């Protein structure tokens, strides 16, 4: 019998009632008295010197309140980068400034030059058209490899080159890795591109700044995944506002996918400008602006090699990657191609020697940062494409080659610095083969052939490092923040509970799942528990939601706080029941004395805590509210095996996904339905990356796919009915719930499955194509067939 | 958007009068024009909405001719053009339900987007574009990218389609916009076959006359097998180069012939 409440049950998402009935409260729904609107005049060239900005006509336009340019930010900080990577030679990365409004130069199309604050949006836009702008256009650098040529135009004149860092990992292993390649019986090499993506959450970014002169307090309402991170970065580094005078609120947020982690210029601007003009300032991004101002994702160019011995055992992996940083360093950009990517290069395999080289490069493009999976999809894609290619070259079954090289002993210390606590890769592979009906594939291939279609099967495994992250470890790796989280469990007098959490829900369903955990621990109904998130004035200092961390890190903090609450409640119960604290048991919302029929209800105890008439006041304080901070001991390591079957229309190159199965090991699962929803969404994004999506720049740095007319988002009919399963369960060993996180898995695990399937389909049509770069559009597949 | 006025006349005559005003522009379903206005790429002083003009709406089959009012939405054509199933199917595959409920055949033909669907149907059917003051043969109407024979202020009031014996439209979609990357409309009449191609050419919709000749002699997919559509003047963009489009023209033509009903 599936459970109907608590951990393991699938209650419907309670937040959906408001989302689906139009009662959500998004940032754009916030409108304040006396509010003004800002329009950003953005660069339409990728690279240029700002010769002059003439705002005199614009300032006299109707409704204009004030026009700001870079000069107004003299003495104000730039947007900080939250991670410093140290290069192969022990030197810190090159870290250019990132002004709120461009100064001296523009560095990408969309770089904000001036901000027009007016009574209405349209007036602000009208005035923007009246600004006289003289920009001397410079040659742009777009391609990462040519950006490193000695004579390439420099994105930042003050840097020595466009190289942010040249990172080697593990540098000490390099010689041994090279030696293994010398000795290898077989070497498989693959060059590939991990295509640049635009996250495109349904809700574009919005920011409202509100300064209250009476108490000198600033409030920023913003579409963020982590309000406290924004408060810290913006308060301490950009505007110099102390935390007690700065409140950051991220109300309902319509999807983030990573791109709403970062601190953006527009947020700093509205907060700054509101203090200047003493009125609220609002900015709502248009979709077109989002394409040129939201941080993009991925954009790696990689050469990866695998050395195998004569028995097809993996001996060594060597990779060479160029990672695009864009024009400025976005908040966590440097960490994505390094610590979130290099550390995953072992995958599910016991390859003893690994060396990863990453050159991060500045170009005249929108900054690139974390996007669902962040570094881990890039690692998985390379590795799982490579293993597939090796199997094809060696003429062995790709599943067998994987199984042969699986890690089977846990804990397992990889040669790339992480230690997997648990996993069972054979079990997930077995499960995948079963739910996918792999053995029926040949028959399905024949049926497709009879229709004139080529059918292919692609499989892959993945491992990811989630539950980000142990603070002391990431501190050593260059993070300028801790990555713990926090929760306060506030029990109300009559027994209902409000939990204030540092995690932020923007689609994940925390409002449903977190109460399930509390309800299970205490034995009360979930409806008695609500969570509060997204407002720095209400929640403890937590780091927000990304990296599949909410339940594993913030959920653990919540469990710890609830344990403290329960410990105290037991003391109160012992007093009420005139028993020893050690004999008190809590079950189904009742405290009882072991071995007797004496009991009292949860509500009796909570009431006593707040109406302490009969209460051990000399021993404990009244009230029932506890906070815990939780810093994880390790990452969590979800893993799984994915399979995809495609049909290729050989005449047009069109790929359709016929079947898709995902067997994941997420450790313990709190709400299976929500977990499946997360996997569905992740796979849809992975399919989007594999078949449809690409942010494409021309050589002048103009974004060619700058709207939905040219940037293909996956739609319902692009994706199949998924077969998903998470019955394989090796609980995480180091967090109290034994959970691993499920938010990114689908986006990490699916692209290689899709591409492997297409390569297999072409092979079944007699076309041995080693690789096709994503997205596998009909045009690209057709060209590959006909080359 | 820039500010503008809107009028909503009830008759074609009133609309023509309103369009004679300074910087006035017709507004059909707004599915092309409104996004253009939002991007501030047009600045009409007055929009003359055609949506309240009953005489411009509806689908009417009479003898061998199907007449569709210029203000008829794609959704209505999809539902009511049963006399010309290939045309109804074309309309049913334009955009999404919201677009089909607003967008009109007159707006689509007046706009003449090189990737739009209707122009191929009009050209392949040898349709007649009826305006407030004349009738224009499809062969004379389409004059290149976003260019037509319409004069300033002229309104498409109806389109007359001779109903073919058999026809079919094959749309190979551009993955992002889902307009046609290449769309081919094949229509077989007693006096010959017409093949019109959309999405492919830098000059907008055009007739593939070689295929027409071959199919008029032998209406089967095999008849096209030996032909090659020329890549000259075809569109090269993110979604496909000219060579690919030329290839697709042939594939879609064969499929349209095979599926024609
Ligand atoms: C998301 C989306 C997807 C789409 N997909 C497709 C697709 O797959 N295939 C396709 O073919 N189209 C597609 N379209 C375009 C759609 O079909 C439009 O409806 C059509 O192109 C314009 O028709 P409208 O009535 O909306 O015209 P409007 O946008 O109102 O006007 C367009 C132009 O025509 C003029 N005009 C309008 N009506 C008349 C008239 N009766 N006489 C003279 N001039 C007139 C206007 O002045 C304007 O210049 C799509 C549009 C959207 C928004």
Image (tube, grey):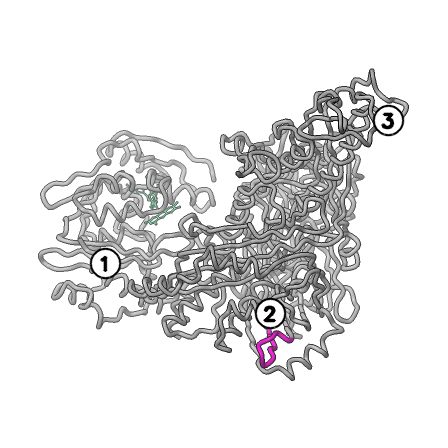
Q: Percent x, y for residue A599?
A: 73, 22
In the image, which residues are magenta? A303-315
Examine the rendered structure and indicate whether residue B128 appears above or below residue A253: below
Q: Which residue is mark 2?
A: A405
The numbered mark at residue B256 is 1
* Cα gap from disc 1 to disc 3, whole angstroms: 83 Å
Residue A116, image quadrant: top right
Q: Residue at x 50, y 77 (%)?
A: A393
Which chain letter goes with mark 3? Answer: A
Discs 3 and 2 carry the same chain letter: yes
**Pointer 2 chain:** A
Could you tell which of marks 3 and 2 lies nearer the N-terminus? 2
In-image side of B153 versus A710 (left or right): left
Marker disc for residue A425:
none
**Closer to the eye: label 1 or 2:** 2
Q: Which residue is mark 3?
A: A620
**Mark 1 vs mark 2, CA separation in Å:** 50 Å
Q: Main secondary structure of the magenta part?
A: strand
């Amino acid at each position: 019998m599936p459970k109907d409440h608590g951990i393991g049950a699938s209650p419907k998402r309670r937040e959906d009632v408001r989302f689906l009935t139009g009662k959500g409260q998004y940032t754009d729904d916030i409108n304040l008295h006396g509010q003004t609107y800002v329009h950003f005049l953005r660069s339409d060239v990728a690279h240029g010197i700002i010769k002059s900005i003439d705002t005199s006509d614009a300032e006299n336009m109707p409704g204009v309140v004030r026009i700001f340019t870079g000069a107004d930010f003299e003495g104000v900080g730039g947007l900080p980068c939250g991670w410093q990577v140290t290069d192969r030679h022990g030197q810190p990365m090159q870290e250019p400034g990132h002004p709120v409004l461009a100064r001296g130069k523009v560095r990408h199309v969309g770089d904000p030059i001036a901000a027009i604050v007016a009574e209405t949006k349209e007036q602000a836009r009208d005035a923007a058209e009246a600004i006289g702008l003289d920009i001397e256009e410079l040659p742009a650098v777009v391609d990462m490899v040519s950006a490193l040529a000695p004579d390439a135009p420099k994105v930042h004149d003050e840097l020595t080159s466009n190289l942010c860092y040249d990172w080697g990992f593990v540098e000490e292993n390099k010689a041994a890795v090279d030696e293994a390649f010398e000795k290898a019986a077989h070497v498989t090499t693959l060059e590939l591109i991990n295509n640049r993506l635009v996250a495109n959450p349904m809700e574009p970014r919005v920011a409202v700044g509100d300064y209250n002169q009476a108490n000198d307090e600033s409030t920023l309402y913003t579409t963020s995944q982590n309000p406290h991170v924004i408060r810290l970065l913006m308060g301490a580094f950009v505007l110099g506002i102390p935390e007690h005078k700065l409140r950051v609120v991220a109300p309902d947020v319509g999807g983030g996918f990573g791109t709403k982690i970062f601190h953006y210029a527009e947020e700093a601007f509205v907060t700054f400008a509101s203090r200047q003009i003493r009125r609220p300032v609002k900015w709502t991004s248009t979709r077109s602006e989002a394409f040129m101002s939201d941080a993009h994702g991925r954009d790696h160019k990689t050469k990866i090699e695998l050395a195998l011995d004569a028995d097809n055992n993996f001996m060594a992996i060597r990779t060479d990657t160029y990672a695009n940083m864009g024009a400025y360093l976005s908040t966590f950009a440097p960490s994505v191609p390094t610590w979130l990517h290099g550390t995953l290069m072992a995958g599910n395999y016991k390859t003893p020697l690994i060396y990863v080289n990453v050159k991060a490069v500045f170009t005249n493009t929108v900054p690139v940062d974390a996007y669902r999976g962040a570094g881990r999809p890039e690692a998985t894609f390379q590795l799982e494409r490579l293993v597939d290619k090796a199997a094809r070259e060696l003429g062995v079954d790709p599943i067998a080659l994987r199984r042969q090289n699986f890690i089977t002993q846990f804990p397992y210390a990889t040669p790339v610095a992480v230690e997997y606590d648990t996993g069972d890769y054979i079990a997930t592979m077995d499960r995948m083969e079963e739910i996918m009906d792999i053995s029926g594939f040949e028959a399905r291939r024949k049926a497709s052939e009879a229709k004139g279609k080529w059918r292919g099967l692609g499989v892959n495994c993945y491992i990811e490092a989630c539950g980000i992250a142990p603070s002391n470890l990431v501190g050593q790796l260059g993070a300028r923040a801790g990555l713990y989280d926090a929760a306060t469990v506030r029990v109300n007098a009559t027994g209902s509970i409000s939990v204030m959490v540092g995690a932020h829900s923007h689609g994940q369903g925390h409002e449903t799942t977190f109460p399930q955990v509390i309800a299970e621990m205490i034995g009360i109904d979930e409806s008695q528990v609500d969570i509060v998130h997204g407002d720095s004035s209400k929640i403890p200092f937590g780091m927000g939601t990304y990296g599949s961390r909410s339940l594993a890190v913030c959920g653990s903090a919540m469990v710890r706080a609830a344990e403290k609450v329960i410990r105290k409640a037991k003391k109160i119960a012992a007093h009420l029941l005139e028993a020893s604290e050690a004999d008190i048991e809590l079950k189904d919302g009742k405290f009882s004395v072991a071995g007797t029929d004496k009991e009292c209800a949860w509500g009796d105890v909570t009431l006593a805590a707040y109406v302490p008439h009969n209460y051990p006041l000399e021993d404990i304080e009244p009230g029932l509210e506890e906070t815990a901070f939780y810093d994880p001991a390790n990452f969590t390591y979800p893993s799984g095996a994915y399979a995809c079957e495609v049909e290729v229309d050989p005449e047009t190159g069109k790929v359709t996904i016929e079947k898709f199965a995902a067997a994941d090991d997420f450790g313990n699962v709190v709400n299976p339905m929500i977990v499946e929803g997360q996997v569905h969404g992740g796979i849809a994004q992975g399919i989007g990356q594999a078949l449809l999506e690409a942010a494409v720049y021309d050589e002048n740095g103009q974004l060619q796919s700058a709207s939905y007319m040219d940037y293909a988002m996956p739609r319902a009919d692009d994706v199949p009915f998924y077969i998903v399963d998470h019955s394989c369960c090796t609980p995480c060993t180091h967090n109290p719930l034994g959970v691993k996180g499920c938010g990114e898995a689908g986006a990490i695990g699916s692209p290689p499955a899709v591409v492997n399937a297409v390569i297999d389909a072409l092979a079944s049509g007699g076309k041995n194509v080693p690789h096709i770069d994503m997205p596998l559009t009909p045009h690209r597949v057709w060209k590959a067939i006909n080359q | 958007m820039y500010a503008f006025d809107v009028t909503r006349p009830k008759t074609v005559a009133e609309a023509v009068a309103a369009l004679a005003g300074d910087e006035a522009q017709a507004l059909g379903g707004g599915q092309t024009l409104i996004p253009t206005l939002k991007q501030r790429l047009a600045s009409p002083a007055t929009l003359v909405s055609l949506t309240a003009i009953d005489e411009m709406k509806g689908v009417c089959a009479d003898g061998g001719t199907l007449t569709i009012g210029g203000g008829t939405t794609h959704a209505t054509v999809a539902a009511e053009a049963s006399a010309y199933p290939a045309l109804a199917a074309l309309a049913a595959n334009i955009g999404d339900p919201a677009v089909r409920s607003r967008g009109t055949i007159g707006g689509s033909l007046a706009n003449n987007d090189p990737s739009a669907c209707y122009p191929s149907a009009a050209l392949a059917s040898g349709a007649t574009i009826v305006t407030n003051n004349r009738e224009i043969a499809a062969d004379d109407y389409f004059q290149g990218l976003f260019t037509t024979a319409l004069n300033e202020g002229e309104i498409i009031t109806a389109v007359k389609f001779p109903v073919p014996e058999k026809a079919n439209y094959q749309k190979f979609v551009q993955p992002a916009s889902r307009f046609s990357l290449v769309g081919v409309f094949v229509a077989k009449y007693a006096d010959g076959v017409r093949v019109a191609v959309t999405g492919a050419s830098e000059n907008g919709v055009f007739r593939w006359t070689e295929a027409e000749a071959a199919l008029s002699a032998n209406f089967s997919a095999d008849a096209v097998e030996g032909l090659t559509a020329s890549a000259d003047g075809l569109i090269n963009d993110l979604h496909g180069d000219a060579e690919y489009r030329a290839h697709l023209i042939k594939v879609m033509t064969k499929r349209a012939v095979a599926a024609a009903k």
